[in-house]
Image (cartoon, grey):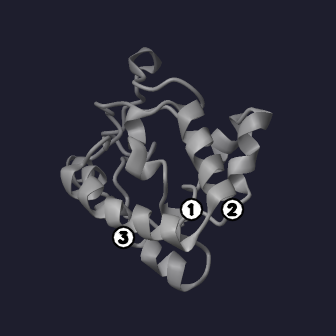
Amino acid sequence: MYKFRSMHLKTDPLYQEPDQTTNDRDGVCKKYKVDPRTTKVGRFIRKYSIDELPQLFNIVTGDMALIGPRPGLSAEVDAYPTSALSRLNGIPGLSGLWQVSGRANTDFQTQVELDQRYLNQQSICLDIYILLVTVPTVITANGAY
């Protein structure tokens, strides 16, 4: 999936590994409100999801859908418990039920449950609802860091 780079590479002299004890989210997917890997510009583009705009190209090419579970990072997927694997059964989406229900303010188990609920209840009405709620969620940066 395409994204604008918002973090320093490990080879960059400015790269700093985050302190694992400062993780702000339980579960497989680690989140840090203050992540030393994020660039100055990266903090802004991540907060307002600008870093994800290139994924519109993934949607046009059919690699992603507008709505669906967010794609997982390979390292995270490798660590998923068996109960979380079903969230990978759908086409990954630019936005989804998890994104409009708290984003990083939710724990991993809640993210999985919301993605599974979306996959089980998929409908055009649910997709329209998620699209409509995505705009204010992104503008207010609710749950984004």
Q: Which residue is mark 1?
A: 68
Residue 133 in the image, given as x and y percentages of width and height: 33, 59
- Taking the image as drawn, is residue 85 in sight? yes
Q: For residue 53, which numbered disc appears in the image?
A: 3
Q: Position of residue 81 (x, y in %)?
A: 74, 32
Residue type highlighted by circle 3: Leu
> Compared to 126, does 44 lie above or below?
above
Position of residue 68 measured from the top left corner of the image (x, y, whole percent): 56, 62
2 or 3: tag closer to the N-terminus: 3
- State the separation of the CA atoms marked 2 and 1: 7 Å
Q: Amino acid at mark 1?
A: Gly
Q: Nearer the viewer, mark 1 or mark 3?
A: 1
Amino acid type, residue under disc 2 in the picture? Gly
Q: Secondary structure at mark 1?
A: loop
Q: Quadrant of residue 23?
A: top left
Residue at the spot of label 2:
90
Residue 88 in the figure: left or right of residue 107: right
Disc 1 or 3, which lies upstream in sequence? 3
